Image (cartoon, helix red, strand yellow):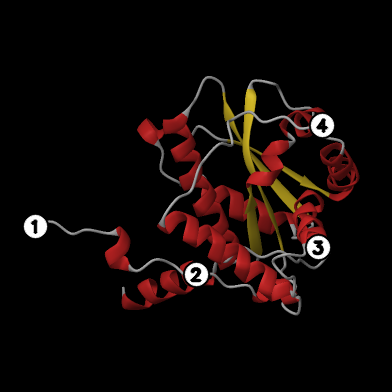
Amino acid sequence: MAEQARIFEEVVLGRRSLRAFLPEPVPAATLERIFSVSQRAPSNCNTQPWITHVASGAVLQTLRDDLPNRFMKGDMSLDFPYDGVYQGAYKERQYGSAQALYDAVGIAREDKARRQEQFMRNFTFFDAPHVAFLFLPEPFGLREAADLGMYAQTLMLAMTAHGLGSCPQTALSFEADAIRELLDIDPSNKLLFGISFGVPDREAPVNRCATDRAGLADCVYFHS
């Protein structure tokens, strides 16, 4: 059991949001294994309220060509509000995360042009060979979104265990209508976010970005 725990900790600590990938596709058998084991994620009453669409190859290239242009023209659509306000410690963590990313790629905080350029890489999926789009079917809401979050974490840990990198991207939810249109997805499926994934480019400066975590005493309280 100690060895099993060590391996699990290694996988959890090895998962980071990576933003540069090699072009080589993941073998189909590996994809099937990763997504199959991720179906074991927990959910309320075992409802499994998630629909996942994985884009690769020519389909992914179509998205890569189309989404940046739509976004720059202001052609945006969101299925869920993006209106969170961060204050206090949460704002500090957000700022620290952004600063770590800019430091990794050598972008000064005041360099708005390069910051925008870095942000736009979301819509070309950081050159990843695959993207998973995670949808909630109607009429599901907040509780089922929590279930989908547990599925997403399971999925990214499975990717890490197979030597792959991933990056969850709420930015992709800004183009929900376009993604449904280009992938021919039923309008009743509502997009929460996407996950770009593949073999990480270990030499890319952006992948040196590492963020810290709050201390245990800041978030967890034990009662007895």
Secondary structure at badge 4 equals: loop
Instruction: Give the class, few, some or many, for how many residues have Cα within 10 Å of label 1's Cα (few <14, many ≥20).
Output: few
Q: Amino acid at mark 2?
A: Val
Mark 4 vs mark 2: give the one in front: 4
Q: Nearer the viewer, mark 1 or mark 2?
A: 1
Q: Which residue is mark 1?
A: 224
Along the polypeptide, which appears first: circle 4 or circle 2?
2
Disc 2 target residue: 11
Figure check: 148 above or below 168:
above
Mark 2 residue element: helix
Q: Amino acid at mark 3?
A: Arg
Of labels 4 and 3, the one closer to you: 3
- Kind of residue indicated by mark 1: Ser
- In this rendering, the label closer to the viewer, 2 or 3: 3
Q: Is 143 or 109 nearer to us in this picture?
A: 109
User: In this figure, which residue is indicated by the disc labeled 4?
Assistant: 75
Is residue 157 shown left or right of residue 102?
Answer: left
Question: SS for tag 1?
Answer: loop
Mark 4: which amino acid?
A: Asp
**Label 2, label 3: how many angstroms apart (C-alpha)?**
33 Å
First in sequence: mark 3 vs mark 1: 3
Which is more foreground, mark 3 or mark 1? 3
Q: Which comes before the other along the chain, label 1 or label 2? A: 2
According to the picture, the residue beneath numbered tag 3 turns out to be 114
Q: How many marks?
A: 4
- How much space separates mark 1 and mark 2, taking CA atoms? 31 Å
Quadrant containing the N terminus is bottom left
Q: Name the residue rendered at 72%, 77% in the picture.
A: 202
Cα distance in 3D space between marks 4 and 2 = 38 Å
The residue lying toward the viewer, choosing from 73 and 145, is: 73
